[in-house]
Image: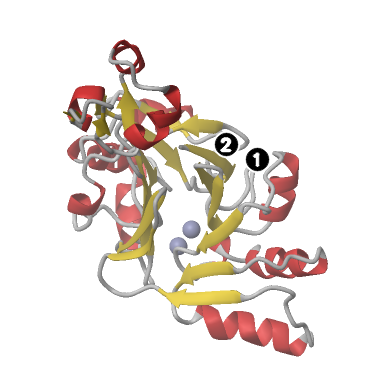
Amino acid sequence: MKVTILGNNSALPAFGRHPTSQVVTVYGETILVDCGEGTQAQMQRYGIRWRNMHHLFISHLHGDHYFGLPGLLTSMSLLGRTSPLFLYGPAALKPIIQEILRVAATTLSYPLNFYPLPSTPDVLVDNAYFSLTSFPVRHRIDCWGLLVKEKTRGRKLLADKCRELGIPSTSFERIKAGEDYVLPSGERLPNSLLTIDGPKGRAYAYCADTVYTESFLDVIHGADTIYHECTYLEEDKEKAGLRFHSTASQAAQIALKAGSKRLLLGHFSSKYKDLDPFREEACAVFPESQIAEEGMTYEV
Ligand SMILES: [Zn+2]
Ligand SMILES: [Zn+2]
């Protein structure tokens, strides 16, 4: 599972940085997480295609998180998309999109399925490959985070042992899927003798715009990589609180308490040109902190 950063800034584009957007790739599926202004151009720039994109998540209705959405939705239609798209966001997003399409007399070429985010943690998608869970965070308006969990990738076959036991390779796929093997003599070889646990699925937590809160710690606990906003440095802690944003140090405290392996820092205020102080401040609390750089792809 990987995450590619398309925009890492807050309200305004500044110093070459774009408003918030990122894509999570899991088993070939591309999940778009927020869609600030300029997201389409950033997708083109970094070679992100929407052919395998079926799930779009919008955390909240501040413009720096969704002003790129109408453009993306209509471009997909202009280019003849037919496969359905699932859009998860605040309930008010649906009439906004409907009105934009109505006044432009536009009918999309593909089904757009809208799902309003509820006020408690909710499983949006749960298939054989991954799950998506939304959870409320604390911001000036209703806002949600997203947990992407990769499913365990099957059993790991003990191939040498299987060959020694005379099992033909044509049976390997079924054994990997968890089946026992029956020898021609009728003896049953239990699956636990032929396989071991596969690699554990990884988890990525996107903690959207939020003031410091531990209210969703239980949902994101154990996530391998956490993205947490840090609009300000600790010297502007008071301002951060008043505007329902976090500081780099607070983001690091959340990553530490969540038992994460890595923290990606983003959503920087346009007043900062140099981002190094964010990394330094966060690393003092949680050493595995780094800036979520635009155009960079991170293994979760
Ligand atoms: Zn924002
Ligand atoms: Zn916001």
Q: Which mark is residue 51?
A: none
Secondary structure under tag 1 reads: loop
- Residue 11 visible at all: no
Q: Position of residue 86 (x, y in %)?
A: 53, 68
Residue 71 appears in which quarter of the rendering? bottom right
In this view, the residue in front, 73 or 10, is 73
Amino acid type at mark 2:
Lys
Which image quarter has ligand 2?
A: bottom left
Task: Please tell me which residue lies in front, 45 or 138.
Answer: 45
Residue occupied by mark 2: 273
Instruction: Report the residue at 44% width, 80% height from top.
Output: 91
Which picture quadrant has residue 288? top left
The amino acid marked with disc number 1 is Phe
Q: What residue did someone put label 1 on?
A: 15
Asked if disc 1 and disc 2 are in contact, CB closer than 8 Å, the reply is: yes
Q: Residues within 10 Å of mark 2 (few under 14, many from 20)?
A: few
N-terminal-most mark, 1 or 2 = 1
145 vs 246, nearest the viewer:
145
Residue 216's place in the image compared with 110, above or below, is above
In the rendering, at what x and y percent does residue 172 appear? 39, 28
